[in-house]
Amino acid sequence: MANLRNLGREMVKAKNPELHKSLFGSTASIFGQLILEKRMSKGISQDDLALMANTTQKTISRVEGGNSNVTMDTYDKLFDALNISPEERGQAFLKKTERGNEVIVGANPIYSHSY
């Protein structure tokens, strides 16, 4: 199933790079920024978060950088480790829609990006 999903991503990327960025890049960016903000607000290092989520520091770096080749399983481990609720995840998407490209967690803007 994962191979089929990856094939679909690659087909979209090859035929329409802008659509690929819109579909996959935005989610990765929003989740990455949300995880970065939560980690920083809790004073947790990437190494410590990697231990908490049973992953590697390199993976944390990729996630926080908005890499779109991250599995939902990895995001779930990080959300659990940082106690990020489904509501907070949804809020990050809603705030992005409301404010353009600025993702908000709680009352603190994380970053403002142009996509």
Image: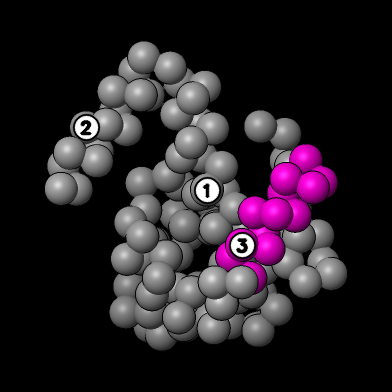
What mark, if any, has residue 7 been given in the picture?
Answer: 2
Chief secondary structure of the magenta portion: helix
Q: Is residue 1 left or right of residue 86?
A: left
Q: Which of 39 and 1 is in front in this view?
A: 1
Residue 56: image quadrant is: bottom left
Amino acid type of the residue tagged 2 in the rendering? Leu
- Could you say which disc has been placed on residue 90 in the image? 3
103 to the left or right of 79: right
Residue 84 in the image: above or below residue 69: below
Residue at 17 percent of width and 38 percent of height: 4
Q: Give the range drawn in magenta.
A: 88-100
Image height of 34 relative to 5, above or below: below
Q: Is residue 5 left or right of residue 69?
A: left
Residue 73 within the magenta-colored segment of the rendering? no
Question: Looking at the picture, which amino acid does disc 1 mark?
Answer: Thr
| Label 2 or label 1, whichever comes before in sequence order | 2
Q: Residues within 10 Å of mark 1 (few under 14, many from 20)?
A: some
- Horizontal and vertical percent for residue 79? 48, 74
Can you identify the residue that label 1 sits on?
Answer: 27
Mark 3 / mark 1, whichever is N-terminal: 1
Q: In this view, does 65 lie to the left or right of 37?
A: left
Instruction: Choose mark 3 or mark 1, whichever is in front.
Output: 3
- How far across and down, in percent of the image, does residue 77 sit? 38, 75
Marks 2 and 1, how far apart at CA: 18 Å
